[in-house]
Amino acid sequence: MSGKAHTVILPAPFPVNELPDRFGAFFQEKVNTIRASIDSCKTDRSPEHEPFLGNSFETFKSVSEKEVKDLITSSSPKSCDLDPLPTTVLLKHLDPLSSVITKIIKDSLTSGIVPNSFKQ
């Protein structure tokens, strides 16, 4: 050791009741900084802006509720923890759900839009 005393510099004291606000402000600033750095990395070549290079369909054949039910019941009954609705529950309640599922499919085919929440 060199014999020199090490001086510790502490922040100026502040009222303890300010601690939660200071803590929150610190992390909010961290989040804002991270978001800004992510935004600066984005390019205009995101999937939404990529040109479509595949084949396109001009028309779709409408599906019936029976076709939807047949497709669901003939599919593998496997599920994943990420599935919002386990296959066993879907199959158990298919009769009341099939009309809603059929409407969602028809609306998606008619509009040409699949909601983002359905793509997860």
Image: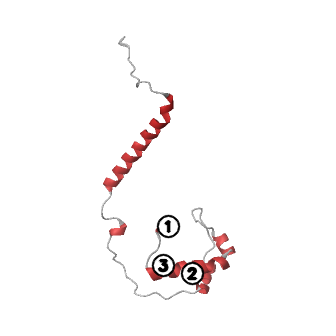
Residue occupied by mark 3:
108
Seen in the picture, residue 48 relative to 40 is either above or below; the reply is: below
The amino acid marked with disc number 2 is: Thr
Seen in the picture, residue 114 relative to 25 is either above or below; the reply is: below
Seen in the picture, residue 56 relative to 93 is either above or below; the reply is: below
Residue occupied by mark 1:
117
Residue 62 screen position, x and y as percent = 51, 87
At label 2, counting other C-alpha atoms closer than 10 Å, the crowd grade (few under 14, some 14-19, many 20 or more) is: some
The disc label shown at residue 102, or none = 2
Residue 43 occupies quadrant: bottom left
First in sequence: mark 2 vs mark 3: 2
Q: CA distance from mark 3 to mark 1?
A: 13 Å
Q: Quadrant of the N terminus?
A: top left
Residue for point 40% across, 85% down: 57
The amino acid marked with disc number 1 is: Ser
Residue 113 occupies quadrant: bottom left
Q: Is residue 60 left or right of residue 4?
A: right
The kind of secondary structure element at disc 2 is helix
First in sequence: mark 3 vs mark 1: 3
The kind of secondary structure element at disc 1 is helix
Q: Nearer the viewer, residue 19 or 80?
A: 19
Residue 77 screen position, x and y as percent = 63, 73
